[in-house]
Every structure is written in C-alpha cells, then in structure tokens.
Image (spheres, coloured by chain):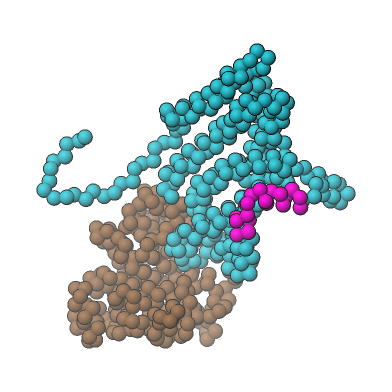
Chain colours: A brown, B cyan
Amino acid sequence: MMQPTTKADPTPGGLWTPDKPLIQLTDVHKSFGAFEVLRGISFDVMKGEVVCIIGPSGSGKSTLIRCINALVPIDAGSIQVEGQEVHDPKLDKLALRRKVGMVFQQYNLFPHRTALQNVMMAPVHVLRQDRDEVEQRAHALLKKVRLSGKENAYPGELSGGQQQRVAIARALAMRPDVMLFDEVTAALDPETVKEVLITIRELVEEGMTCMLVTHEMGFAREIADQVYFTDRGVIVEHGAPDEFFSAPKDERTQAFLSQIL
Amino acid sequence: MTERPSVPFAVLHPYRRPEPRPFRLRLRLIHGVGIAGAVALIGGAAFAQGGTSTRSAFEVILQWSPLLLSGFLFNITISVLAMLLGTIAGIALGLVLIGHNPVTRWTGWVFTQFFRNSPWLVLLFFAMFLIPYEFRVAGTTIPFPDWIKAVIGFSLPVMANVAELVRGAVRSLPSGQWEAAESLAFSRRQTLWMIILPQCVKRMLPPWMNLYSLVTMATVQASIVGVTEMLTLTSQVHAAEGGRPDLLAPLYGFAMLCFFLYCYPIERFTLYLERRFKV
C-alpha cells in the first residue's frame, strides 16, 4: 500500500485551530458481526486535556480508543483528529498516525530489535528523518522514560514495566500531538505499574494530550481532567474526577465503582 | 540431592525452562551399535562368501567408492539446488497466500495444495516429460539435461511446503505486532519486510531444515527417471560385479550409510535449534 507523502489540507471545512477540540467523536457506531460494541459515542478532547475511560470489561473501551487512530474502522458517525476525518475511505493514514501515538496493553515491542532500534525505526523508515538526528532523540527519549543504559537490550531482556516504557518512548518518537493508552498497566506486575504511571504523569505535566483506558482508579482520579464511564457501548456518565468518583449519579456507575473501590 | 528444609505446606516454584544445551553431536552407545551393525552387515556378508576367487564386499565397495561417492555428491547437488529454487519460489508463493487480493490468494492456495498433496515421484515424472530437453532463446540453444529437470521436479513440492511454512509462521505471530506497526504508520510492505518476516525466519528454520533432509533422501527417486545419481550407480556397480547376490546388501547398505551420515547431523541440529528458539 502506497502512502501519499504530500500533505494535503486535511480539513475540508477550514484549518484546525487549537481552540477547537483536538479529538471530536460524534455518534460513533461500531459492530463486530451482530454484536454492537459502540452504540453512539460522542465526546470532545481539547488540546492538553487528559481523558480517562473506565468501565467493565467488554464495554467497548479498547475498541473506542482503537477507532481513533483507525486501527478499527467504524461503521457510522464521525471521528475528527485535528479536523481530519478518520471515518473516510480516502483517509491519509500516515498523516493521522503521525499525530496519534498509541501504547498497547501487551507492549507489542518488536522483539528482534533492541530498545533503541524500536524507538528509532518509525521515524527513520516511515518519516525518513535523518538517522543521526533520530538516534540522538531516541537516546533522549529513553533517558526521559528512565531507561538510559538499556539502549541495546532486546525486549525479551527487559521487565514488563521497562518494555512498556520503551513502548511509550517509541510512540513519542513520532512526535504525536495526542497519546492513546490502552490499559497499559493491565499486564504488569503491581511493583512495575508505578514506574509506568510515573512516566505517564510526567507526560501529562508537560502538557501532552492523553486518552487513557485504565483500571487504575486512583491514577485516573489524580490525573484526569475528564472521566468517562462506558457500559455496553454507550457513555453512561462523565465528569471531573472528584465529582465523578465521590458522587456518581448513575446506578451502573455506582455499582461499578463499589465493586472496584 | 540437596537438603531442603521440610515445610508444612506445598511450595509452588515458578516453572523454569531448562537452558538449551550447547550443540554437540553426541555419539552414544546406540549410534556406535548402529554403525557397527552396518559394518557387520557388509563384512559379515562378505565373510560368508569369502571364496578364493571372489573379492570381499569390503574390497568391492572400497574400489568403487570414488564413483559411488561422486554419485552421492550429485544427490546433494540436486537437493541443494532444488531447495534453493523451491525456497525462493516458496517465499514468493507464501507472500501471495497472506496477501489481501482474494483472487491471487485463492489461486495461490490451489497451487500450494496441489503441489503439497501430490506424490513427489509423480511431480518428478511430470517435470521429466513435460519440460523439453533444450530451449532455444534468440538463436542459442540452452540444453536442459535430465538432472536439471529433476531439480525442477523436486523444487515443486519444496515450493509448496515452504509457502505453507511462510504462511504458518506469519499467522503464528501475535496480531499485536501488526497493530503496533500500523499505529506507527508503517506501510504493509514495510511491516512485512522489516517486522514480520525477520521474526518468521527463526520460526521457519527448524521445519525448513527438516524439509531439506526429506528432499535429500527423496533425490534417490531421480534414479527411476534415469538420472545417474548414487542409487543408479550402485545398481550399475552391482551389475559390473557380476550381479552377485551377496553384494546387494553391502552395496545398498553403503548408500544408506552415506545418506544417514549426511542427514542425521542435520536432524540433530534441527532439534537443537528448536530447543534454542523455543518453538
């Protein structure tokens, strides 16, 4: 598949400006076969905002976050990232994925490449940036996620938490405008969860726009600007974290939170 | 036995996969017995016939061994070339099998199944009788001797099997690898060549070597279609020695021994790689 490299104006309706939502979902529907995973989801994420999505297993959280960088095509509705429509057959995926970084639950590092190479691969081969410049940046990124000295380690030689931090550095190497985190601590040992959360918090403090699907309620409460609770493909309730966690309004949210907390 | 303090409860130790042992060709008693048996077969049969006018089987084999071994070398040449050709074609076919185009994928699938499920000898016959013995290209004649046709004949099942290996190895990789590559904006082609296939090589190597071993042993079938390889030569040597029945077992035993000594280390090495790569 050839990716067009010319940057056409991604916004038919005029240029995106930072005062508009960075991510805008409008009535998003998605089915897998007869099973409707997303049944009309709408919300906005502003630049610099941190949004946490929580909810029971199978409520469509992961699917939702995967739709945003077009890993999963949606059936109906609209997703705009900086004004670029994702639900469009002529979507310029390269342009979209430069803007959106993603970190997965299972890390998904490339096991045949070292940590440094994992971070460098996409900028060098996809963006065709200068190798030396990328290497310097990759060193800096690994330092930022506190993995200096592990540059030449293969993923198999790293702990889960270390692998996940390499994965974060790898996504950051593309200089995205927004980071998506899909249950990034769910596969980790309790001791290593913290080191990954610290890394994410540092990103947030630098002003990175983030969307997290998470089961770490304490972390969500501490870090989020908005918390969304999804169940059976719809957003049941959302709000600022303090209000959301201390006084949930909907019964399903109350039931869910009482089970978790 | 190390002393362990007895505890009143069960302790579940984490499973540790044993470290792969370094590769060594371990010749144990059983191997010695096997080789000794083969020698005894040769020598014993010779001894039984050890008249004054007839030479022992040992002498016969010794005398003809340069010829027989040159035949064996030919078998190896055929197997290596068939493997080379079949692997290149097989990787190409395997990429078709995992492609997105349903028409080419279906055609490739039929192709693969046909050559995977045909007897090798039948494919060999096809190659022998359907490929002309020479080609004329722009005035020059390119001869196509029997042995090259045999190489092509053997490369067909190799191709189909390698294609299946490629397809299986690609399918066996976690889908997260594709997703991660996609989210980093790699194109499908880049993903395949830089991320997926390099990881497949490791998975494919042991079964690929197994296949090679099978091809080597199958090359003797070329004698049926008239290629002068080791088995053909063995039967000619036997005829030249007057067709003595007592030479039959030692001569063919020698051929068997040659193949065994060639294929057995490959087999051991394959097992070692399987342990090492943890597949």
The picture places residue A46, in percent across and down from the top left corner, at 38, 79
- Residue A208 magenta-drawn? no
The picture places residue A259, in percent across and down from the top left corner, at 20, 75
Of residue A113 and residue B15, the one placed in the foreground of this image is B15
The secondary structure that most of the magenta stretch takes on is helix
Say left or right for A223 vs A68.
Answer: left
Of residue B274 and residue A226, the one placed in the foreground of this image is B274
Residue furthest to the right: B139
Highlighted range, magenta: B113-130
Instruction: Please give the name of the residue rendered at 65% of the width and 45% of the height, measured from the top-left corner.
Output: B82
Of residue A133 and residue A60, the one placed in the foreground of this image is A60
- The quadrant in which residue A197 appears is bottom left
Say left or right for A66 vs A201.
Answer: right
Q: Is residue B203 visible?
A: yes
Say left or right for A111 vs B232.
Answer: left
Q: Is residue A144 visible?
A: no
- Residue B115 magenta-drawn? yes
Q: Quadrant of the N terminus of chain B?
A: top left
Instruction: Please give the name of the residue rendered at 30% of the width and 85% of the height, measured from the top-left corner.
Output: A236
In this rendering, the answer to whether A128 lies above or below A152 is below
